[in-house]
Amino acid sequence: MKRLLYIIALIITITACSDTDGFFSVFHSKAGKTQVSPFLSLKKAMKYIKDNEQELRFLQSRDLSPSDLKYGLARKSYYKGQLLIEIPVVKGMITTGNPLDNLDGRSLRTSVCVLFDKYGDIQTIECIERLPTKEYFDKHGNSLFYDDFYGEMLIYDKSDNIIADVDFGKAITRLSTDDEVADTDTAIMLPEVVVPGHKPDNSSPITPDDSDLGNSDDNVNDSDMSTPACSYCNYSPLPVSPETNDYYCPNCGHDYSGSMGSISSGSRGGGSGSSSYHKIHTATSYLTSHAHPTYNPKTCGYCARAVRLALEQMGINTSDHPLYAKNYGPYLLKWGFSEIPKTGYTAKEGDIRVFQNYPGGSQAGHIDMYNGKNWVSDFIEHKSYPGKGYRNNNYKIYRR
Amino acid sequence: MISTKNRAILSLVTALSVFIAISNSSAESIFTENKDENKNKIMQFYVNYEKALIQENYLRYCEMCDSLMNIYCTQELCNIMKDDRVNGIGYDFMTNDYWMDDLSLKTLCVTAQESYYIVSYQVIVETPQGKVLTNVKLQVEMGDGKICRVAPVGKKAAYE
């Protein structure tokens, strides 16, 4: 009898010491099959994404980590009667909700959509790219609160003023609101990830056509498209403005003169191949695709050459190019660029900055070009300035 | 009944276990002491490094940075920094070029891992899209009591 009691005690001890998920997880999963709660589903999605980071290729290909998924701004929707949770992706954290200060729409480009089956199990996970509309910001009173789903956090600036309040309560409210679904205008679907071991009831993937998420029917990977489409609202075909001889979007009003944005992939096949937009976009694409993803002193140090080769993509003959990056200013003026004042400056795709050298720094100076998202030279610069020495240094901006 | 021979073996095994336990705990305490010392050094370095980084005058920054690195970092790391200032873009390898600000000091945290240390802090980074609050996590390694390697966690250092 004593031995039996001892064995029972031993089993209880081993169970207690092992992973506490044991009995409870079974209970939860059974409970989950009877009731699909958005809150529990979001928790499930969070856990799944965290546990399967390596399998979700869209995370690696975009250098994202699970912490870049802002669960606090997750919204629920339904696709063919199935629960769909959309989780915005933001690298780092946003300091304030004022879009005039630091949100220009690019922050919410990417979302991860998790589709649940009728039993509450994850069916597919997809990554989509989209842009918010002005209505989005209006609807949220220009306030955006990013953080993981739990807790409240105050963020302070240098002067100890509160610049952001990440609010748990607001996240919950937003999650349980059904109508906040279709306030973004563009959805570009990337390849789906079917959760291993799941046998979906409905094998058809979500498409922008029939999901609640957007009204686009253009896929960015469709290389056969020959009609130019707006990269902001996917309106197609884009007409050419008789005034600027460049594309403009009559739907969202986006103007491609000066090439602020990027036209969907099919636009290159359009008839206006010689337009300034195309030349600039070709140059920035070339520069970005040849740049190192981050700085490395062993492989970088050829900023002038990188930008010069990009200029050649614009049809500029650079045979008489200057040696040093710092000397490119007059050269650019010769090729039709003009200097842009720095006051009130907003970067546009194709803009070029020429930095002079500074005491204690490289003699060559520096040069880089804006690709619509980052400044790029022979590496992609992830901040506004290439190095500390160039921050307060004398530089000029040129635009063609 | 336990025989004399068995008793002797039992005593020997007990003595050996006690010896191993004592030696293990003392080794562990030396190791912990080392870790605490290194953690303090790293913390001191980054607290002072922030003061250098917020200098508006670039030459003053270089001066402060060099003098700090000479104390806390290996010669190799000092040379890499100096070399990139003259021949490169002046990349800040000690923070993976995120730099630091006052907010970083408030959020600075050093934790010891098995063979390295994690330095984490928040910093407001200026990007073309605006100011972004960024969580920085660095993997700092020590060699001979000095910082010998700084890299993003689980990744190569920018100079490697």
Image (cartoon, rainbow, N blue to C red):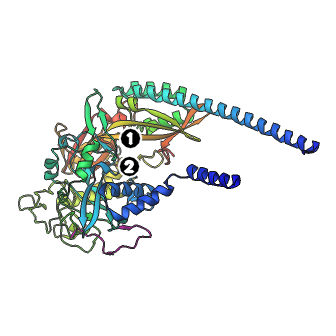
Please tell me whether residue A193 belongs to the stretch shown in magenta: yes
Tag 2 subunit: A
Residue A42 quadrant: bottom left
Task: Classify A311 as above or below A223.
Answer: above
A307 is higher (above) or lower (below) than B4: below
Which residue type carries mark 2? Ser
Any magenta on residue B24? no
Residue marked by disc 1: B135
Chain assignment, label 1: B
Whether residue A357 is visible to the viewer of this picture, yes or no, is no
Q: Position of residue A106 (x, y in %)?
A: 24, 51
Q: Is residue B84 left or right of residue A69?
A: right
Residues under numbered marks 2 and 1 in contact, where contact means CB atoms less than 8 Å apart = yes
Q: Main secondary structure of the magenta part?
A: loop
Name the one closer to the observer, A331 or A145: A145
Provide residue B69's location: percent of width, then percent of height: 51, 29
Q: Which residues are magenta?
A: A192-209
- The residue beneath circle 2 is A67
Considering depth in this image, is B24 or B64 the residue closer to the camera? B24
> Residue A212, located in which quarter of the rendered image?
bottom left
